[in-house]
Amino acid sequence: MLENREGQTIPTVTFPTRVGEDWVDVTTDELFEGKTVVVFALPGAFTPTCSSTHLPRYNTLAPVFKANGVDDIICLSVNDTFVMNAWKQDQEAENITVIPDGNGEFSAGMGMLVDKADLGFGKRSWRYSMLVKDGVIEKMFIEADVPGDPFEVSDADTMLKYINPEADIPAPVTVFTREGCPHCSRAKTLLNKHGMSYEEIELDRNITSNTLQAVSGKDTVPQVFVGGKHIGGADDLESWFKQ
């Protein structure tokens, strides 16, 4: 049975981490003392749900969490520091602090270390999230104790809704671009100027002008989408901001 530990202090653990070419010990005191921290724990780096949804959404909403009083967002997994660092780089998750619970000490101390030997994983963390204030757990969202890898309540949106149900969540923005395109650069500059983060999709052999025309009705770049709505090119985006 996975125990909800709200009101309790987090385990005291030292994590061996790799920073550049150096080994650096990071303690739970450094991570949590005097801070408001969101933690989300997951079974493994580079695994499907963790890579496609869990980590990316927390990374995207990090500025909103910060605006609502969160000092840091920690992603924790029973992986070594090399794997966690490589995953963070691959995911371009610059807003997330990745912590390698390689020996499973923190997960065991939380009562969240589970056996996934059936998948060849060995001991791993159960999927959960928590809000920690000055080392004390205020709120936990623990996935249901059922077979498989449920992902229903430990997501970023659920946590943000708990922290502030009225939080202003920005619409997702996607920009189709081509390397060396000056109008693409202008569109990205406009988005940055207005503080809007975006996903950039650069046309290549797999994503062609035909693909772009299929989704936008246009074969020129850039093509900007905001919240599922097609805005258009750089001039259209400029007009949209003026409106």
Image (cartoon, rainbow, N blue to C red):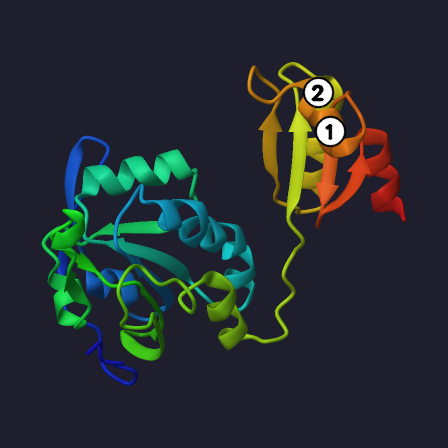
Residue 214: mark in rendering? 1
Distance from disc 2 to disc 1, alpha carbons, whole Å, reads: 6 Å
Residue 210: mark in rendering? 2
Q: Secondary structure at mark 2?
A: helix
Q: Are marks 2 and 1 in contact (CB under 8 Å)?
A: yes
Q: Nearer the viewer, residue 96 or 203?
A: 203
Q: Amino acid at mark 2?
A: Asn
Residue 117 vs residue 223: left or right?
left
Could one spot residue 225 in this view of the protein? yes
Q: Amino acid at mark 1?
A: Ala
- Residue at the image point whose x is 41% and y is 54% from the top: 54
- Residue at the image point whose x is 30% and y is 83% from the top: 6
Q: Nearer the viewer, residue 45 or 1?
A: 1
Q: Reply above or below: 229 against 203.
A: below
Could one spot residue 11 in this view of the protein? no
**Where does the image place residue 12, in percent across and percent down from the top left?**
14, 68
